[in-house]
Each structure stands twice: as structure tokens, then as C-alpha cells.
Amino acid sequence: MIAIGCDHAGVELKKDVIKFLTEKGFELKDMGTDGEPCDYPNMAKTVCGLVTSGECEKGILICGTGIGMSIAANKIKGIRAAVCSDSFSTKFTRLHNDSNIMCMGARVLGSGLACELAEIFVTTGFEGGRHQRRVDLITEIENNN
Ligand code: RB5
């Protein structure tokens, strides 16, 4: 299950991403907003909570730039959020960082690219090995600050 949420800037793109991933066979839990103004930190907290609780394996957050969502999400223990705007970074943030949240900017990306990036994010696995050690170091920073 993939959690997804957006603020008012990301409503249309979120609809496109949900339609695209659903047609590919993925299950999504849509946390809104469906149009009402929404403060992105609140949505980041809601979607990330579904991931840290284990209810959803990954999450997708959409705001105007993707940046506000990523800043908020990365404040939450256990979350590794990446702003994704290109396929290389999207693939490698899964392979190397084991990112569990992707953030996208609805005012940055077209719908076709955003859907393609979402598919890369949800289908790419973590490589582990030396990257596990680095992810563990991130967790250590998180635990000590
Ligand atoms: C909302 O206008 C906008 O600030 C928000 O969507 C996001 O881009 C923040 O990072």
C-alpha cells in the first residue's frame, strides 16, 4: 500500500499519479487534500505517519515545489524523503538511500514525468550492502539529535 497526499497546489497532479499507479496495479491510500487549502506540514505528518506505523510501505507527497513537503517529512523519525524531479535521482534514492517518501513539485513537473518517476520510486528496491551502513549512519544522526 502506498500513501499519497498533497496540498492545494498538488491536487490535479495527485489525481493523475493515483490514476496512473492504480492502472498499473498498485494500491494507494489517498489522504487528500481534494481541493481545500491545506498546510503542507500537516499533510506530510499524516502521510509519513502511515509509513512509520507500517500501514503503508512508502509515501508520495506533492506540493508546489516538493521542497516544503520534503523538509517537513524529513523531520519525522524514520522518514527518508527525497525531492524527485528526474529519473536518475529517483532510481538512486531508492537504491542507495532507501528513501521511503518521494516528494514532487506540481509546479515543477509535468504529469507524464511525475507518473513515470512515481513508478520508478515504487518499483525500485534498496541495494543494501555498503548503503545499509550509510543509512544506519543517518539513523544514528537522527537518534542523537
Ligand atoms: C503553496 O502555495 C506552496 O508554498 C507549497 O505548495 C509548497 O510549494 C511549499 O514548499
Image: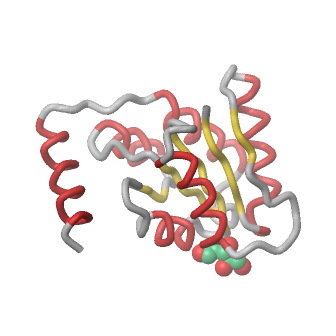
> In the image, what residue occupies the spot 79% across and 68% down?
8
Residue 41, position in %: x, y? 60, 72
Pick the quarter of the image with the N terminus: top right
Query: Front-most of 89 and 24?
Result: 24
Q: Say above or below: 140 vs 144.
A: above
> In the image, what residue occupies the spot 24% across and 74% down?
145
Residue 137, position in %: x, y? 15, 55
Q: Check the image and name the residue furthest to the front.
A: 53
> In the image, what residue occupies the spot 55% across and 54% down?
49
Residue 105, position in %: x, y? 62, 62
Query: Front-most of 135 and 18?
Result: 135
Residue 143, position in %: x, y? 23, 64
Query: Front-most of 65 and 36?
Result: 36
Q: Say above or below: 57 vs 135.
A: above
> In the image, what residue occupies the spot 44% across and 45% down?
100
Q: Quadrant of ligand 1?
A: bottom right
Q: Quadrant of residue 80?
A: bottom left
Q: Is residue 95 left or right of residue 58?
A: left
Q: Is residue 134 left or right of residue 75?
A: left
